[in-house]
Image (tube, rainbow, N blue to C red):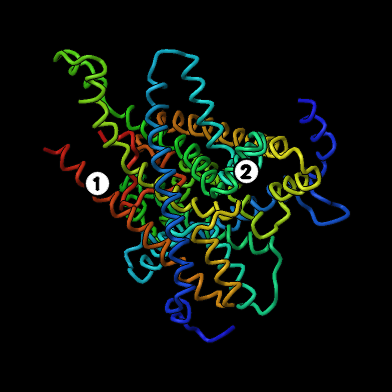
Amino acid sequence: MTDLVAIISDNWLLLLVGQYPNGPLGGLACTLILSILGIALAFPLSVLIALARTSKWRLLSWPATALVYGARGVPLLMIILWVYFLVPVLIGRNVSGFTTMVCTLVIYEAAFLAEVVRSGIQALPRGQMEAARALGHNYLGAMWSVVLPQALYNVMPSMLSQFVSTIKETTLGYVINVHELTFAASQVNNQLLTKPFHVFFILAVIYFIVCWSLTQLAEWLERRIATKRRGVSTVRPAVDAENIVSPIATDRPVPVRSIS
Amino acid sequence: MKDFNLMAILLNPEFSAMLLHGLKTTLLIAAGSWTLAMTLALILLAVRLTPSRVAQHAVATYVSYHRNVPTLVQMMLWYFGLASLLPATAQAWLSEHSAEAVFAVISLGLCQAAYFSEDLRSGFRAVPLGQTEAARALGHSYIGALRHVLMPQAVRNAIPALVNHSVSLFKNSSLAMAIGAAELTHAVKELESRTFRAFESYLIATVIYLLISLLIMAIGAWLGRRAALATAR
């Protein structure tokens, strides 16, 4: 126990911000910046992919479906290797591990978030679209001002869960030497050499605190939205929290709880 | 970059043996951890269904830990951390017997057990209460009702989620590369540094991963259809 306290008090700054300001920003700060950048850049893309995937035109829906299945079927590590190799070839100069990781997360998360958004769109009653069209909106106008605002609001908890997944996925940056939290912890471990269990236990606890708080927030949000919706309309339940992490491969979302 | 030549890797006996060995390790890790995860998930579910508050909280804590800590960190904690606490003889034995793969199986299995048990639990909650009551009224014991009436329906409800998490378990087996297990991604990295054919190596591995994932999804869809038919009857 005293070991734990000693390791934390000696290395808390390294775990928090890495070698900043004498070196690159790292540690927990880097992990959070990576995840926020990844999810923020992936969000607009994911809405586009979701619209393409729900589109009637095969020219749009097939590539989007292929992208989603590709991201679901290939390990993130493999995608990191691809980006690490392809981006320098495409833009003609070397990129940092940080940039590689952001690009990877944007591609990967866009595909998964797209499934979340799509489940939100498809969980809305068809009447919403029909009424908006009857009032004179064109398809995109109805999507933009009637369907999407409701769908995105309903899937907010799921998006937050996806953010938690993103935080967990940034750990893979360790493999390509991005200076994030796991990398910082392994640096500490390499300095101490004799206390691997203590160091990685501290690492696990830090991740747990961050992700658990966000998970609690997501659950609170879900309850709040459910209460609000019960008051206003009879919308089908958007998605089960379980189906968010890896969306289900059917045409319509099948919330586990409503099957029977 | 060299000219694209897939056959330079596939037809070379040494390189294709490396790939096959990697694939075999990946499949072994995935199958081993899946079995461990499913067994443990059923035990966790059984514990959670007992009336004991303490037991329920213990399972909830287990699930919460494994869902909120990155899988890679769990794996490192096992491989670097817990292994170092073992007695020296055990450590020596392990390092001779591919400890990386063993710890990968343990950490992936324990982690996915949390997801599987949650899937089964939500499948369970979807079974109407009347089913238990009817089964008990027909003379089943609690265990008998569980086995013949509730569990089949719960598993049926949980199939989509279980399949999803099986796919992610398979994908997560690639994380074992970070602790040095000689699985497919590891083999591909080595292949790349040996042949300098990154594009071809990655392409082969990606196609293999994608095919197996799609196969798991297809099996899941087939099981789901069969279950739906069985319910309709």
Verify CB contact (< 8 Å) between mark 2 and mark 1: no
- x then y, percent, for residue B74: 59, 41
Reading the chain from its start, which is encountered first: label 2 or label 1? 2
- Image-based side of A116 in relation to A22, left or right: left
Horizontal and vertical percent position of residue A195: 75, 37
Front one among B191 and A113: B191
- Residue beneath the point at 51% across and 70% down: B202
Disc 2 with disc 1 on a shared chain: yes
- Most foreground residue, A36 or B229: B229
Pick out the residue farthest to the right.
A22
Label 1: which secondary element? helix
**Circle 1 chain:** B
Separation of residues labelled 2 and 1 (CA atoms): 44 Å
> Which residue in the structure is indicated by mark 1?
B223
Q: Amino acid at mark 2?
A: Ala
The residue drawn where x is 11% and y is 38% is B233
In terms of depth relative to the viewer, which is nearer, A149 or B211? B211
Residue B39, position in %: x, y?
38, 34
**Corner quadrant of residue B79:** top right
- The N terminus of chain B lies in quadrant: bottom right
> What's the amino acid at mark 1?
Leu
Tag nearer the camera, 2 or 1: 2
Q: x and y percent of residue A154 in the render?
A: 46, 41
Q: Is residue B52 left or right of residue B158?
A: right
Which chain contains the residue that carries disc 2?
Answer: B
Q: Is residue A169 visible?
A: yes
Mark 2 lies on residue: B92
The image's mark for residue B192 is none
**Mark 2 falls on what kind of element?**
helix
